[in-house]
Each structure stands twice: as C-alpha cells, then as structure tokens.
Amino acid sequence: MTRDSIKDLVIEIIEDIDDEADFDGLDSDQPLRDQLDLDSMDFLDIVMELRKRHQLQIPEEDYPQLATLTSCVNYLEPLLKDA
C-alpha cells in the first residue's frame, strides 16, 4: 500500500466508527483524538478494525505511535507494504 492509500484507509475506518467526524482542516501532525473528539473506545475500534481488515496485530505499547495521521501512516507503512 502507498502512503496515500494508508492515509485513506485510516480515514475510512474513522468514518465507519464515527460518521459525524469532521475531516475539514484536519492536521496530519496533531493528535487524532483531540481533533476528532475520539474517545478510548473509538481508538480501540480503529485498532480492532485494522486487525479485522488486514490481520494486523498491534501491541498495546505501540498505540502511542498511532496518535496522529502521519504517525499512523509511518507505523503502518512497513506492515502494509505487501497489502
């Protein structure tokens, strides 16, 4: 997957979880939870959806690496390179 397709995947998953999420003005380098008003359950839903769609096992200690859209892409890129 390309970086853009990974970014689109993350946004698509967030849209599926929170259909009221507003991506206008989203800053890729700021925490998603703050910008989109995601709670901890929403965040876990994102992780679970990545597991379901792409069989990714993301250890809890790596969750901070999924804080921003940019950091999500950086973390997921090597894991999804063959997807």
Image (cartoon, rainbow, N blue to C red):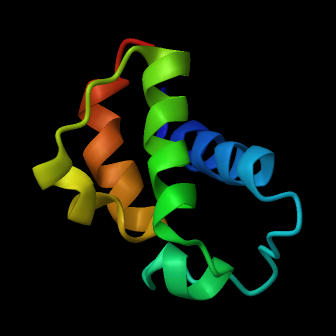
Residue 50 horizontal side relative to residue 78, left or right: right
Considering every residue shown, the one lying at the far right of the view is 20
Q: Is residue 28 visible?
A: no
Rendered view: 78 above or below 7: above
- Picture quadrant where residue 47 is located: top left
Q: Is residue 11 left or right of residue 29?
A: right
Task: Identify which residue is drawn at 87% across, 58% down.
Answer: 19
Q: From what the image shows, is residue 65 above or below residue 47?
A: below
* Image coords of residue 25 (percent x, y): 74, 87
* Residue 27 seen in render: yes
Image quarter where the C terminus lies is: top left
Q: Residue at x 45, y 49 (%)?
A: 44
Q: Is residue 54 above or below residue 39?
A: above
Residue occupying the point 62% across, 39% down: 9
Which residue occupies the foreground of this view, 35 or 1?
A: 35
Q: What percent of the width, then of the height, locates residue 67?
A: 36, 69
Q: Where does the image place residue 54, in percent across and percent down from the top left?
A: 46, 17
**Residue reaching furthest to the front:** 41
Left/right of residue 24 with respect to residue 43 in the rendered view = right
The residue sitting at 42% across, 71% down in the picture is 68
Q: Position of residue 32 (x, y in %)?
A: 52, 74
Image mark count: 0
Q: Is residue 24 above or below residue 67?
A: below
